[in-house]
Amino acid sequence: MAVMDADGLLSRSARGAMNRLSEFVHVCAIYLGIAVLVTMVLGATVPSLREQAKQIHEALLIALQPDGLKQDMLASYGAHTGSAGQGRSPTPAFDFRSALVDSMAGRHVAGITSAQNQALRSYIARKYRIAHSVAGALINTAFTEARARGLDPQLVLAVIAIESRYNPYAESHVGAQGLMQVMTRVHKDKFEALNEDPIAALNPLANIKVGVQILYDCIKRRGSVQGGLYCYVGATGPSDGGYGAKVLAERRRIALASGIPVEP
């Protein structure tokens, strides 16, 4: 009888061990399947992410390199983006480094006081967590380009705030890039008119110039700022999803913070 009990205990122990082993193998199979799935997903997405990171890195180097080096880098960069094959050589027309130097020296556009400029810089730098020097460079560029088109500069600053929160390397799920979220596939001609490749959308100065041109065209086509914002965001239905209201509200906040009157 004792022998039979021992045999039964041994049998139960063996079955328990087999069950635990089976459960372990089952769990391992599940995790192995998850690992394979993750590997497949990463294999499909990482190359494109790596290419985007490379483009952003190269654009940043171009923006901040001294002029002597920048020309060589732009020529090389053009070869990567295909411009060399088209017989067109990009030029350093949008020197973000120089814009930063001007900003750091306290130089600002005419028509506003130093106190207004400082207040505007502080508001944008603090709210959107960017360097004061960068805020100054972007403000100077926005004022220059907007005035050249007869637009309110603070409207342009508000569009940048809503579109990208002042991230010059932002990219939307549909491919809109940069500060003003320019659709480079749609507006390739505007970059070509500046003797630039669409990748220049990642250069803050070029992005603002092209973005202001698009905004100006939209306002002119629709006949009002509200209609222009509806056009700019690409709304197709009866509503723009509150985009225009957000931009105009931010423009009011910018004007209040800076003490600069809103231009009609």
Image: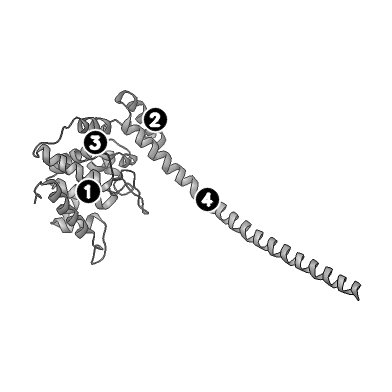
Q: Please rate how many residues cluster around mark 3, counting C-alpha atoms within 10 Å: few if below 14, some from 14 to 19, many from 20.
A: many
- State the separation of the CA atoms marked 4 and 2: 30 Å
* Nearer-the-camera pick, 258 or 186: 258
* Nearer-the-camera pick, 214 or 89: 214
- Residue ID at (15%, 45%): 153
Q: Which residue is mark 2?
A: 76
Mark 4 and mark 1 lie on one chain; the one further toward the N terminus is: 4
Mark 1 and mark 3 lie on one chain; the one further toward the N terminus is: 3
Mark 3 and mark 4 lie on one chain; the one further toward the N terminus is: 4
- State the separation of the CA atoms marked 3 and 4: 38 Å
* Nearer-the-camera pick, 184 or 153: 153
- State the separation of the CA atoms marked 2 and 1: 29 Å
The vertical placement of 229 against 46, above or below, is below
Mark 2 and mark 3 lie on one chain; the one further toward the N terminus is: 2
State the mark number for residue 42. Answer: 4
- The amino acid type found where label 3 is placed reads Ser
Secondary structure of the residue carrying numbered label 2: helix
- Residue ID at (87%, 70%): 6
Mark 2 and mark 1 lie on one chain; the one further toward the N terminus is: 2
- State the separation of the CA atoms marked 4 and 1: 36 Å
The vertical placement of 56 against 226, above or below, is above
State the mark number for residue 214. Answer: 1
Secondary structure of the residue carrying numbered label 4: helix
Of circles 1 and 3, which is in front?
3
- The amino acid type found where label 1 is placed reads Ile
Q: Is residue 197 visible?
A: yes
Q: Which residue is mark 3?
A: 133
